[in-house]
Image (cartoon, helix red, strand yellow):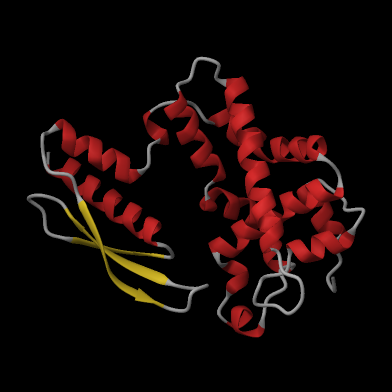
Amino acid sequence: MKKNVTELYKRIGYEFADQGLLEQAMTHRSHKGQHNERLEFLGDSILSFVIANALYDKFPKAREGDLSRMRSTLVRGQTLAEFGLEFGLGDYLRLGPGELKSGGFRRESTLADAVEAIIGAVFLDSNIERCGELILAWYESRLDAISPGLNQKDPKTLLQEYLQARKLSLPGYTVVDTKGQAHNQTFTVECIVEGMDSIISVGSSRRKAEQKAAEKALKILKNES
């Protein structure tokens, strides 16, 4: 890599024996050469296992649903992108000209994918034990702060439960517009809730757009009640 990686090693808490693995982890598919998607796949699976195991040990009385929601909160793209920003990965990403011009080094999904790829690379460079230790070190404060309960439910779930409790019809979500190329799309979603004007939200994925719309709807309903 052209940029000195010593500072990056300090930020992530790991020094690679095979720097080629780190280079691959930092290489977006828009860049020529071997990109990070296979490492991302590997890292995603390892991260899910390590966090699931940590939550299982930390909350011996928690129900499966709460454990799943806490894990989802901890491994979602937004959380991973926060790590990417903390590590300054944008300074090290290898992007194709088009992706670089469009600001890919700041994109949440790109940063999140790179974090997962680093996890996969660390596993291949060391072993599952060392990789697990590193993940838990990254997540120490987040694991300390998280707990089972309502705050782990996503907006769509909360909206559905709110409407069901009042015997109202469930919301409907429709994608009304999609823009951009496959790797950089934006989705416009319309949310229909009984007795309300339709709500429009935009997100980098259908799921994100739906969650934003549900969050808006829930706020309106609570303000009106």
Find residue 179 and report its horizontal and vertical position in percent: 38, 77
With 31 as the anchor, is 179 left or right in this view? left
53 to the left or right of 1: left
How many marks the image carries: the answer is 0
Residue occupying image coordinates x 33% and y 44%: 155
Q: Position of residue 9 (x, y in %)?
A: 83, 53
Q: Quadrant of the C terminus?
A: top left
Which of the 4 image quadrants contains residue 30? bottom right
- Classify 130 as above or below 110: above
Residue reaching furthest to the top? 61
Q: Against 35, is 75 above or below?
A: above
State whether residue 86 appears in this view: no
Residue 131: image quadrant is top right
The residue depicted at 77 percent of the width and 35 percent of the height is 133
Is residue 167 among the parts visible in the rendering? Answer: yes
Q: Position of residue 2 (x, y in %)?
A: 85, 74
Residue at 58% across, 75% down: 103
- Quadrant where the image shows the N terminus: bottom right
Would you identify the image quadrant in which residue 210 lies? bottom left
- In the figure, 83 relative to 186: above or below? above
Residue closest to the eye, 205 or 152: 205
Residue furthest to the right in view is 17
Left or right for 63, reference 87: left
Who's the residue at 77% across and 76% down the image? 33
Image x and y of residue 190, in percent: 23, 62
